[in-house]
Amino acid sequence: MSVGGAVGLDSGPPGVAATPSPTQARAPVLGRLFRPISAEDEEQQPTEIESLCMNCYRNGLTRLLLTKIPFFREIIVSSFSCEHCGWNNTEIQSAGRIQDQGVRYTLTVRVPEDMNREVVKTDSATTRIPELEFEIPAFSQKGALTTVEGLISRAISGLEQDQPIRRANEEAIAERIDEFIVKLKELKHVASPFTLIIDDPSGNSFVENPHAPQKDDALGITHYNRTPQQEEMLGLQAEAPEEKPEEEDLRNEVLQFNTNCPECNTPAQTNMKLVQIPHFKEVIIMATNCEYCGHRTNEVKSGGAVEPLGTRISLHITDPSDMTRDLLKSETCSVEIPELEFELGMAVLGGKFTTLEGLLKDIRELVTKNPFTLGDSSNPGQMNKLQEFSQRVDQIIEGKMKAYFIMNDPAGNSYLQNVYAPEDDPELKVEYYERTFEQNEELGLNDMRTEGYETSLAPQR
């Protein structure tokens, strides 16, 4: 069953901005809607603008706030209210770009506490509950920052709003919907476990992990490549590749291409170069430097194909000198530190070519530097837990704590330096393994055909 476009609580976005309010007039505009502040700014206040009410068509007030979801990314929260007719509307939008891959969150709701998990659901996300054969299609609701219980309540309200008309015109259908609404309400009591799936091709939806930075056994996260139909749905169009008369040797060249800064979205230059890692393979290093806001970023892509076997690299950290080992973490690589009960999933932090110390510092910053976990609204227990995690990471970096550092890459494109090469490293262990069906599915290999595809594409007579 689908709710379609039946959710009338979100009656459209606020109108176009009209005359700035006195609060907005005092703020420096600089040709932008937002003040030039970061989501980490503790003193930031919502921006207020006068907007047209879509109910009574008189001026109301819209408040816009740029904020950040812990362990996620920046979003824009907008809230509109009209003092004349009382109409109000709240929605969220991603403050970043459409991600390189789509994301699918699969949450097994087992206890009532799971209903309080925070959820970011964008316009393009599809919500499903397989046990009830229930689906909320993409673009049938506005984006929302809510909880699991809030999602279910929102669906119930959308189904209930047209019931009086259905009872008058189609009584049988209205009775079936009433029965289904009862089943949805029973889910809120979690009498039995059920599954909630949020599938977002844009990659900008999110489901909270209350156990962060530890792994959540009830929550599965899968990143996938979008289909052409999903690309079209999001308004994306692939550029036709340019034909080159002959192949060029790019190994000694630094290539530049135009892109947009991921922070301020102004035009910037990205440099790209092929680099050969000793005793490993070629990789592509890309670096972007924005002259407008000063933002810098670098990313590493594998220069070769997916390896026949997955790779599991284990390093026993016993000395501070281990921190200087070169390290290549691909986008498909996950990281584990058993002594900290920590696991970093695939695609988090992207591809990186750095040292072991550099990656550990990036992990510490990712986990601990969030305004929701360190600000006034943070949970004291969670804050203490994250501070303890940061201290233990520092102990590993300083050589005061021994630990195992494990890199698991199903694509086999990650690397950790062997300082004794070409001899064996007594503290480094490299294992090769056959990928599971699920790992091949995540890498898109199950549906890939490299032999015999010409026959299937040939026209049939």
Image (spheres, rainbow, N blue to C red):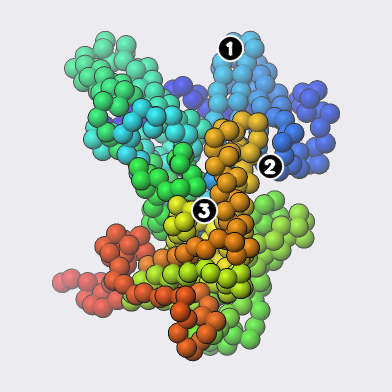
Number of the label disc, if any, that sits on residue 99:
3
Q: Amino acid at mark 3?
A: Gln
Q: Residue furthest left?
A: 461
Number of the label disc, if any, that sits on residue 86:
1
The one of 66 and 187 positioned closer to us in this rendering: 187
Q: Residue at x 40, y 45 (%)?
A: 216
Q: Is residue 207 above or below residue 461?
A: above
Q: CA distance from mark 2 to mark 3?
A: 21 Å
Q: Quadrant of residue 19?
A: top right
The mark nearer the N terminus, 3 or 1, is: 1
Whether residue 26 sits left or right of residue 94 in the image: it is right
Q: Residues within 10 Å of mark 2 (few under 14, many from 20)?
A: some
Q: Residue furthest front?
A: 400
On the image, the x and y values in percent for residue 140 come to 41, 34
Q: Residue at x 46, y 36 (%)?
A: 119
Q: Residue at x 63, y 39 (%)?
A: 374
Viewer-nearest of labels 3 and 1? 3
Viewer-nearest of labels 2 and 3? 2
Q: Could you say whether the residue bearing mark 3 is in a helix, strand or loop?
A: loop
Instruction: Give yes or no for contact between labels 3 and 1 (Cβ–Cβ under 8 Å).
Output: no
Q: Amino acid at mark 1?
A: Gly
Q: Could you say whether the residue bearing mark 2 is in a helix, strand or loop?
A: loop
On the image, the x and y values in percent for residue 41 come to 72, 39
Q: Is residue 434 above or below residue 7?
A: below
